[in-house]
Amino acid sequence: MLDPCTFVIFGSTGHLARTKLLPALYHLDRAGRLTDDMAVVCVGRRAWDTPYWRDEASKILQAKLGEALDSEVLNRFRGRLQYFRADIHDEEAFKRLQEVLETTPNFPANAVFYLSLAPTEYRPVARHLADNGLSEETSGWRRLVIEKPFGYDLEDAQVLNHSLHRGFAEQQIFRIDHYLGKETVQNVFVFRFANLMLEPLWNRNYIDHVQITHSETAGIEDRAAYYDGAGALRDMIQSHLLQMLTLVAMEPPAILDAESLRDEKVKVLKSIRPIPKSAVHAQAFRAQYGRGRIDSREAPSYLEEEGVAERSTTETYAALKLYIDNWRWRHVPFYLRTGKRMARSSSQISIRFKHPPQQLFRETQIAEIPPNWLLLGIQPEQCLRAELQVREGGIGMRTRTTQLDASTCTQTGYRLDAYEALLLDVIEGDHSLFLRYDEVNWAWQVVDPILKVWSIERDFIHTYPAGSWGPKEGDRLFEREDQKWRDSLMEENR
């Protein structure tokens, strides 16, 4: 059973709170996962009061859930909501918040502080919380949740960590990466470590290469202020994609607890071969979307988006080739890519096995046997799929590719949303799917040399049409001509 707690959301009127946090807490309430006395304190600058905010939250949930909204659950959830007006730059507001949290009779002593704010606000808010005693665990536990990005580069991440640790211990800090809450990502644990038949194949002797792709049809929308200073490498690869890489490549932990899991992920990040400045162009590629068509609609170029600098060379597409220098993965390339305004929105891990020896079929009609693939769909399909070769019926020796799907590929019905799972973990104090500081530090060390080179190359950037799968020039990262990007979970002609 969960401990009762007071869940405090800073930035409660912002995009993340409206689209993810409030719906996630509502669904947890509907599933009976919240304690009866849990309170949700929503902090915002607007001149609202609690009755007004409850009506506003009802509208938000109605717009998000439509007919799926349960009126009885909604009324119960509304009763949990409290609005606290405050400017996060006003230290007096934190003194008032402390008094409210400590003196309100129906507020549990345990508290979660969720910073649904711009990353630049993490340090001052954490400092104000600590200065006013809100990080002290005298009468109950205190937990601080921050969203990625965890810093702007390696140096900034180190400064952020030092600042957070001035008032909060590491075990109180939850660095949330919502990708790790997705069911298929969590399935990687079971898929790898509960199936003995895969273990002998999960290494450099059988695997040709690994691809990790996250593509979006959306552009930057209203995030120009953040995105034009960040780019695809910081926004996606440094966090989400490197985390997925660690799950694919990690060794079995001694036990399934948070620290053991995170220890193994850190070992992977430490083992990634450093990229010297002289090798950046051989192992990294960037580009920016130009005009094109998305779902038969005209799409503007990145430079035409509102709020983007006129001569910006910020990348909206980034691809990396990485090597993990350990016994299991030596010389196996890991290809990571992400992009905005691409042909389809999807996230998947594609593992290609080596070609079988050809001598057995040299006297047959088989020209070349396609390799086996193991495919893990993260979104929108949540799926585990294997591609194998079988013989076609009829005269002669011919093969075709068949796909074997895990039951999750066709599973319907409600799935636990990533934020729902992660918010439960915060309340339970389970760090398994959250990033420890040394994970963040080592991930930044992987991409920092690339960022430094790209930061001084401001005269030119490759482009690709919106609605495409990115620039062809990016294929130069592949080691051989028979290696190509896997764009779909469906069978592809290679």
Image (tube, rainbow, N blue to C red):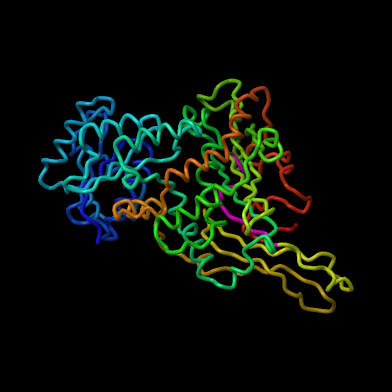
Residue 242: % across, % down: 54, 47
Dividing the picture into quadrants, the one containing residue 137 is: top left
Q: Looking at the image, which residue is at 55% across and 33% down? A: 231
Quadrant, the N terminus: bottom left
> Looking at the rendering, which quadrant does residue 395 occupy?
bottom right
Quadrant in which the C terminus appears: bottom right
Q: Which residues are magenta?
A: 341-353
* Residue 306 image offset from top left, x and y in percent: 51, 25
In this picture, residue 72 sits left or right of residue 301: left
Q: Position of residue 366 (x, y in %)?
A: 83, 69
Establish if 132 lies above or below 324.
above
Q: Nearer the viewer, residue 216 or 126?
A: 126
User: On the rendered structure, is 471 left or right of 437?
Assistant: right
The answer to which of 421 and 280 lies nearer the viewer is 280
The structure residue drawn at horizontal position 78% and vertical position 66%, both measured from the top left corner, is 369
Q: Residue at x 85, y 77 (%)?
A: 396
Say if the magenta span includes residue 191: no
Above-or-below relation of 404 to 351:
below
Mark count = 0
Q: Establish if 96 lies above or below 273.
A: above
